[in-house]
Image: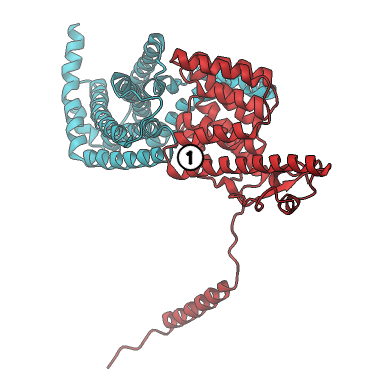
């Protein structure tokens, strides 16, 4: 227990400095800018809807928030770890009498904190625009703007956290500039697509047996390497009032947390063995 | 003494200006190629998901908006097939999408795309267990487009179960009984389209649906006139003008979609688009 305390107090300054430099850079402006854009697109999409403008606004908004959070996660990890390694400024941080792991984990916590701020800000903006996008029209089936909405936002945050952990791992071993950003983005797309692909094959791939035969076993393997990030997407609840089961939420979070731990451990190991000269 | 003008850049400038003017004036006479098809391609589901960053809900919204902004009044029959595929894919990606089943019902079956509509409505019935409309439209399509009065009656009873009000349930169950001996009832079809128009938030879409309803009523009036004509003359009318000449209708109605009305080989008035070539 004492060791955890020591690790945590070693991590803390790195976390705080990550948060500070996150806010000092144009991150906040960026969040607001992207948020406004996102809300604009969502409301525009909603205005196309003949019967459920609020649902469509919410739906497109969730997709936009997911996209933004993943983007932030990848860029902040690159900014706070990748760039420091690249410019060798990381050596100042590592000159402290703390482990390299503490530096890495502190930075990760900092990114998680920044993501919370971004999720709450973007979620709040979307929440307001959903409320106001109704106008005078009353939908046949109202959306839920209470805690199912915020649970969904939390799920999107968890999704971004997994992507951040993956990007951190890549940053811990990459010697190529921007590689963490590129692979992080690729990971986010692949992880999110996995659910739809598995679903398609499970339901018989529209009768395409050849497709199942060719990719079925490959995908069977991939789902134990790649997390199914679509399991952290619970939007059917606020949008259609179809509740997500406790098990789906719990195991979804468990899957995400396990994967984050795995990646963090791998990142700490590779970073600890890394030569900077 | 002024500096000498550099020869080469000046030359290039003159040549460039000349070439530009030549090209520009030549282009005036060249017709712009305009992609004719309103909705040309339906992408494979995987491509749609990947393009949406792995987000199946975003992919679904994209398809639905695509379907909504398509000018269906100007589409060729094979394009309706593509539209049907696009909407069917959207329903696979997000079966609960309210606009998707609603637009599909409003457009597709009337243009021969009954099968995709029924797939979309079938999926929506399962996921939207709280919504009576998907099974209701499913029932109507069975009756009107597929001539399956018995199946329609079954589905209508199923829809009745989703109605919250017991009185409405009873009304719909009565309707289900009545449907057993009705099919090809244009006036009923027009009433259903009008009811759909009344639900639309967007005025342009509501107007579009009302035009569709009017078209059906015009056709119904033509059929009644043709029936009277057959009774009076002992043979079916050869053209719509026979009906005008016989004084049964004032003039041939104008089709708001431009396709117009015709008389098939059995003397039955139909939409021009339904005429077999």
Chain A tint in image: cyan
- Give residue B197's position: percent from left, percent from top: 49, 37
> Which residue is at 38% across, 14% downward?
A249
Q: Which chain is red?
A: B
Report how many numbered discs are placed on residues in the image: 1
Q: Check disc 1: other Cα within 10 Å, few if <14, some if 14-19, many if 20+.
A: some
Quarter holding residue A231: top left
Quarter of the figure that contains the N terminus of chain B: bottom left
Q: Quadrant of residue B114?
A: top right
The residue that label 1 is drawn on is B65
Q: Label 1, secondary structure: give it.
A: helix
Extreme residue toward the right, this view: B234
Q: Position of residue B64 (x, y in %)?
A: 50, 36
Reply above or below: B233 against A99: below
Residue A42 visible: yes
Q: Position of residue B50 (x, y in %)?
A: 51, 34
Whether residue A217 is visible here, answered yes or no, is no
| Direction from residue B11 to residue A274 in the image, left or right | left
Foreground of the two, B176 or A234: B176
**Percent x, y for residue B105?**
57, 32
Q: Nearer the viewer, residue B254 or B121?
A: B254
Residue A36, by quadrant, is: top left
Q: Give the letter of the chain under mark 1.
A: B
The answer to whether residue A150 is above or below residue B20 is above
Q: Residue at x 26, y 21 (%)?
A: A101
Q: Camera-side residue: A256 or A180?
A: A256
């Amino acid at each position: 227990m004492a060791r955890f305390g020591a690790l945590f107090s070693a991590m803390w300054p790195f976390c705080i400095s990550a948060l500070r430099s996150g806010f000092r850079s144009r991150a906040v402006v960026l969040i607001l800018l992207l948020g406004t854009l996102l809300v604009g697109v969502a409301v525009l999409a909603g205005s196309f809807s003949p019967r459920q403008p609020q649902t469509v606004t919410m739906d497109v908004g969730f997709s936009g928030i997911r996209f933004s959070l993943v983007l932030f996660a990848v860029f902040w990890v690159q900014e706070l770890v990748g760039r420091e390694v690249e410019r060798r400024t990381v050596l100042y941080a590592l000159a402290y009498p703390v482990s390299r792991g503490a530096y890495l984990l502190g930075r990760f916590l900092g990114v998680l904190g920044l993501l919370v701020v971004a999720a709450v800000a973007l979620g709040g903006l979307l929440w307001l625009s959903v409320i106001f996008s109704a106008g005078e029209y009353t939908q046949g089936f109202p959306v839920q703007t209470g805690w199912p909405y915020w649970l969904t936002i939390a799920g999107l945050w968890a999704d971004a956290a997994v992507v951040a952990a993956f990007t951190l791992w890549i940053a811990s071993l990459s010697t190529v500039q921007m590689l963490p950003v590129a692979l992080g983005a690729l990971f986010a797309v692949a992880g999110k697509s996995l659910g739809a692909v598995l679903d398609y094959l499970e339901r018989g791939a529209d009768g395409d047996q050849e497709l199942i035969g060719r990719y079925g076993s490959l995908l069977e393997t991939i789902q134990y390497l790649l997390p199914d990030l679509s399991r952290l997407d619970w939007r059917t609840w606020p949008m259609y009032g179809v509740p997500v089961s406790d098990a789906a939420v719990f195991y979804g979070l468990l899957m995400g947390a396990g994967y984050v731990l795995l990646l963090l451990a791998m990142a700490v190991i590779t970073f600890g063995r890394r030569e900077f000269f | 003494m002024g500096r000498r003008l550099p020869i080469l850049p000046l030359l290039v400038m003159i040549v460039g200006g000349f070439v530009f003017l030549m090209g520009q004036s030549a282009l005036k006479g060249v017709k712009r190629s305009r992609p004719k098809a309103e909705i040309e391609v339906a992408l494979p589901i995987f491509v749609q998901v990947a393009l949406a960053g792995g987000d199946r809900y975003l992919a679904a919204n994209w398809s639905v908006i695509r379907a909504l902004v398509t000018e269906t009044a100007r589409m060729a029959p094979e394009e309706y097939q593509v539209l049907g595929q696009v909407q069917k894919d959207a329903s696979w990606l997000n079966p609960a999408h309210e606009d998707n089943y609603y637009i599909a019902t409003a457009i597709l079956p009337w243009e021969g795309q009954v099968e995709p509509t029924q797939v979309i409505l079938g999926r929506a019935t399962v996921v939207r267990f709280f919504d009576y409309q998907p099974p209701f439209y499913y029932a109507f399509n069975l009756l009107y487009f597929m001539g399956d009065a018995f199946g329609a009656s079954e589905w209508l009873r199923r829809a009745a179960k989703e109605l919250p009000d017991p009185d409405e349930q009873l009304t719909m169950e009565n309707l289900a009984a009545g449907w057993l001996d009705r099919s090809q009832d244009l006036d009923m079809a027009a009433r259903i389209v009008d009811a759909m128009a009344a639900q639309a938030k967007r005025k342009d879409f509501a107007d579009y649906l009302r035009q569709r309803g009017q078209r059906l009523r015009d056709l119904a009036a033509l059929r009644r006139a043709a029936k009277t004509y057959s009774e009076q003359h002992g043979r079916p009318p050869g053209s719509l003008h026979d009906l005008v000449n016989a004084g049964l209708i004032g003039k041939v109605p104008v089709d708001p979609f431009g396709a117009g009305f015709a008389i098939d080989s059995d003397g039955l008035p139909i939409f021009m688009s339904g005429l077999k070539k």
